[in-house]
Amino acid sequence: MDFELKTLNRALVCSEKTDALIVLVPEGLAAGDDALSVLATLAIKSGDLELKPGKLLSAYRTPGIEATRVVLVGAGDASEKNVRTAVNAAMAVLKTSNAQRAVLCLGLLTNLQPETVRAAVVACADASYTYSTTKSKPVAAKLQKLAIAVDSLDPVQAGFDKAIALVKGIELAKEWANRPANHATPTLLAGVAKELGKLRRIKSEVLGHKEVEKLGMGAFLAVAQGTAEPLRFIVLRYEGGAKDEAPVVLIGKGITFDTGGISIKPAAEMDEMKFDMCGAASVLGTFRALAELQPALNVVGLIPACENMPGDKAIKPGDVVTSMSGQTIEILNTDAEGRLVLCDALTYAARFKPRAVVDIATLTGACVVALGGVRSGLFSSNEALAESLARAGDSSLDLCWRMPLDDDYADGLKTNFADVANVAGRAGGAVTAAKFLQRFAADFAWAHLDIAGTGWKSGQAKGATGRPVPLLLDFLLAQATSVSMAPAAPKARAAKGRAPAAKTRA
Ligand code: BES
Ligand code: MN
Ligand code: ZN
């Protein structure tokens, strides 16, 4: 969808010719004498419009208003969350109409913040997204253009720009996570990384079986050995900071299909294991957004990508493999494959001397049981890092919840046959998985996001959510804020690729 930020006060918005006008109406509306205010006040007075977030009143060819359709939506106290709810409700109405162009009026909200505009734009994009890649006759969304009408651009322009970048990232993540496994192989994911590598300040590198073997990634190789589909280890770099500045490393679990391997999963809903690369997709999406915004910091993205399949070459329960770290692992359950590919990526991450490493993974069904689809699981032994990630989740409405990492949770990972087992019992499964990863992250500040419940939706609305791209982007931008955003270099200079040096951070 095409977004535009436009200055239109209440009176002007009434004379705007468009297919649909969506008006967010807050509690305590200070009405004026324009047609819109008159309509809204009348509707509230008569009890036909409630201001609870998401309550709607639709009108058609309304006197004094040029737009064909008018949708008044209650926005409650106009918090970002309520604005998101209101926009979602209005977009659901528009989806069933023939409107091609619409105006979303935010002009009735007092003291409009950039974050509110961002929430509105992201919600619009989310509601209008449709997957069509593997349909023979794609049905294009009717709504093509959406103008966001505000009283003045200056205070909210930055929020709008950030939203546009974020939407590009979210949509890339959704697209690749939604593609079925035969249309999103490790090689195809590597192709996405290569495309991203053409964007300003981004470089990409793709390792194959030979290089991964040479690095000694025995745990990653063990998972990949069960399938004929070649593995890929993707390395992305965003270079927006000074050359000697330590990067943040993002690691995305890239299991393009998880059958469980020899410890095979039941048939019901197994198709959803095409989403087992949502972590990888979120890293790709975050790089897409970074390319738009060009913040002053360095970021590395690592994606171990392969399938987890049963077969005559597949790993067997009880097999012991040697990880890149040198630690031996007894694979008691081949379905606990995510931690196996991630542990070698964590070891690889150390070479970047990172200021922080965050892995993102659809790691455990246990996390879905614990937190459902509302919050991602956040695990970290580093207080400052955990705090920054939690805050980024709050500010972007992409919530997470801190989970424990007591050493006692690691007891079940003990085995007589290797340094560590890849599973403990059923109890506390999300935590024991994190405890396994923690053994490979001792040398840097590390956090783990379990997105098994938040990466995609099941049922009627089955599809990827693009989470946690909003959280990751806010986290990274906060890392870069003490040095205002890097100025955009002129195109000619951009080819040489180096960013202006960043100044000291707080
Ligand atoms: N990809 C799954 C986790 C998963 C399962 C995410 C269901 C979302 C919905 C992961 O590889 C897995 O299979 N984990 C096992 C671990 C177990 C064997 C210790 C699980 O959660 O059952
Ligand atoms: Mn699995
Ligand atoms: Zn998995």
Image: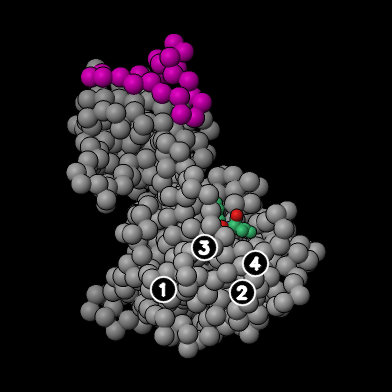
Q: Disc 4, ligand 1: is the CB inside 8 Å?
A: no
Q: Which mark is residue 319?
A: 2
Residue indicated by mark 3:
261
> Could you say whether the residue bearing mark 2 is in a helix, strand or loop?
strand
Q: Bin the neighbour count of mark 2 within 10 Å (Cα to Cα): few under 14, some 14-19, many 20 and up.
A: some
Q: Disc 2, ligand 1: is the CB inside 8 Å?
A: no
Magenta span covers which residues? 39-62
Left or right: where does residue 19 sit relative to residue 29? left
Q: Bin the neighbour count of mark 4 within 10 Å (Cα to Cα): few under 14, some 14-19, many 20 and up.
A: some
Q: Bin the neighbour count of mark 3 within 10 Å (Cα to Cα): few under 14, some 14-19, many 20 and up.
A: many
Q: Disc 1, ligand 3: is the CB inside 8 Å?
A: no
> Could you say whether the residue bearing mark 1 is in a helix, strand or loop?
loop
Residue indicated by mark 4:
332
| 2 relative to 280, above or below | above
For marks 3 and 4, give the CA distance.
12 Å
Residue lying at the far front in this picture: please name it.
Answer: 312
Residue 322 at x, y = what percent?
Answer: 60, 81
Residue 231 at x, y = what percent?
Answer: 41, 73
Q: Earlier in the sequence, mark 3 or mark 1?
A: 1
**Is there any visible trace of residue 51 in the rendered image?**
yes
Q: Is residue 115 magenta?
A: no
Left or right: where does residue 147 sit relative to residue 431? left
Residue 91 at x, y = what percent?
Answer: 35, 34
Q: Are marks 3 and 1 in contact (CB under 8 Å)?
A: no
Give the amino acid at mark 4.
Leu
Q: Earlier in the sequence, mark 2 or mark 4?
A: 2
Q: Which mark is residue 231?
A: 1
